[in-house]
Image (spheres, coloured by chain):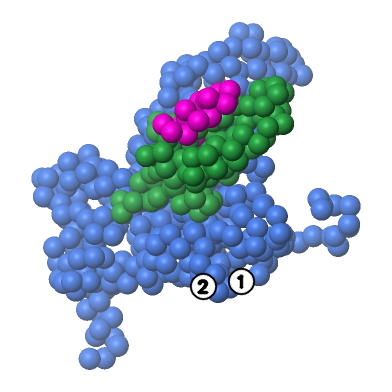
Chain colours: A green, B blue
Amino acid sequence: MVKMLLRFHGNLMREPVTSTVILEKGIKLNILKASIHERGGEMLIEVPDEHANDIIRAFESKGVDVILKRTISVDSDKCIHCGECFSLCPADAIHISQDYAVTFDESKCVACGICVDACPMRAISLILF
Amino acid sequence: MSVLTSNYEFEKPIRTYEEINEKIRKGDAVVLRADEFKRLAEVKGYENVAKEVDVVTTGTFGAMCSSGAVINLGHSDPPIKIDKAWINDVPVCHPGAAVDLYIGATQMSETKPFEYGGGHVIEDLIRGEEVELRATAYGTDCYPRTRLETNITKYDLNQFYMLNFRNSYQKYVCATNGRDTVIYTYMGKLLPQYGNATFSGAGELNPLINDPEYEIIGIGTRIFLGGAKGYVIGEGTQHDPGNQMGTLMVKGNCMEMDAKFVRGAAITRYGTSIYVGLGIPIPILNLKIAKNIAVMTDENITIKVLDYGVPRRSRPVLREVSYKELKSGRIEILGRTVKVSPLSSLKGAIEIAEILKKWIEDGRFYLSKPVENLPRDSIFKPMKEKPLQREWYRR
């Protein structure tokens, strides 16, 4: 899955842009986060890899800025593999391997940020919004 | 066979500390990690493994709040008898003479509370980083100075000792949360309605769990502490042998430590703490010691699952669970399977036991016989207090 951040400006705020793209393209996408703030509207979506280019072009043609972003970053120098984050992840993106190393599967991460403040080493940061 | 004969056989010495140290000197000592010993004993029987293995190493790497470091600054000119002091804005305690300070791991920075604390100061000093020291004093005839501001590294100190008054629990509890909201505890972030669970300790790798009768680990036992050699100096506070929750008081030289195994920790809405890496070697002196290690597997070590949503001294016990189940990553609570987080680094625990093994194999670490054993019958009492008033706690 590819995650992309959509930015809606000015008059686009009133248009049902996302529904239009979904109906026109017939592609299912997953909305992970949506908000409206001072910079305009922002939405984080998740799209199957094979449809990513189609979706990017469709949104861009309607005047939406599409930004491809990573969701979280883990500082491996800080992580001590305590595993505190593991049980908090609703998307099962954090694994503990056979040798008890903690690993992150960014393709599964939904950028909820629940793990971030639980890390005692402050090794995890959310890149979005 | 009578009980007496079997006990005699059981406790008959198969090797002594002196013989083991002689083998270490020659580079012949056979050392296994506790987990390796247990797996091998399951296949070959502990009696057979005990014949071949001289030493078993243990390890744990977890948050240990009752930790800190003693430093001696040397004297300023004119001299100061410090009254209050801060390092990187973290208040440090001045419990003794003029320039001896104790950096408590849970003391928080006054400018970055909950994010930076005494544990981080100790880590930064071990890394060789420069820290800012400020102090005030009331001034006396012999110590006239009232104010001090300087930057120091560990190389400017006379002494820099880790002195931890409760470390390395024999085993601990598993925490979950029955409330409707998320809570932030010293056992980590707990999701509402028993949404997850956390546990502490390394289970079968924990030092004290492998010496359940406190025959090996005692005052004077040489250990791995924070990447250097350290010593057990007594039982820790809240030592509770009756509930298999023994603890250790330890000391070590921070000047020689590795910050990889001494890490400041920020536990959201609880405070700051420190992760301490600690490992202890256990000599296989007789079959009883070997059997105790072999029996204490993750499967056989069980702990209580407590509801930390109830903020009382006695929290409701939901069930008993083994470390084997906990380390599988999922346990059942009230009919629902939830994920469990180890709060101690299990990867770190194995690494510490492995390093200690290498030190012994390479002749860099010798075993010491304790000069006193830890108490086996002490009681962990609750507090004597006055009747509780409603305005005395946070709701």
Number of callouts:
2
Dot 2: what SS?
strand
- Residue at image point 53% right, 52% down: A90
- Residue at image point 22% right, 39% down: B364
Q: Using the rendered image of the protein, determine whether residue B217 is visible from the camera's viewpoint.
A: no
Name above or below for residue B13 compared with residue B3.
Answer: above
Q: Is residue A54 left or right of residue B85?
A: left
Subunit ID for the residue under disc 1: B
Subunit ID for the residue under disc 2: B
Residue A75 image offset from top left, x and y in percent? 43, 31
Magenta residues?
A: A53-72
Q: Amino acid at mark 1?
A: Val
Asked if the stretch drawn in magenta spans residue A54, the answer is: yes
Label at residue B317? 1
Label at residue B320? 2
Q: Quadrant of the N terminus of chain B?
A: bottom left
Residue B385 image offset from top left, x and y in percent? 79, 60
Name above or below for residue B110 compared with residue A108.
Answer: above
- Residue at image point 42% right, 24% down: B127
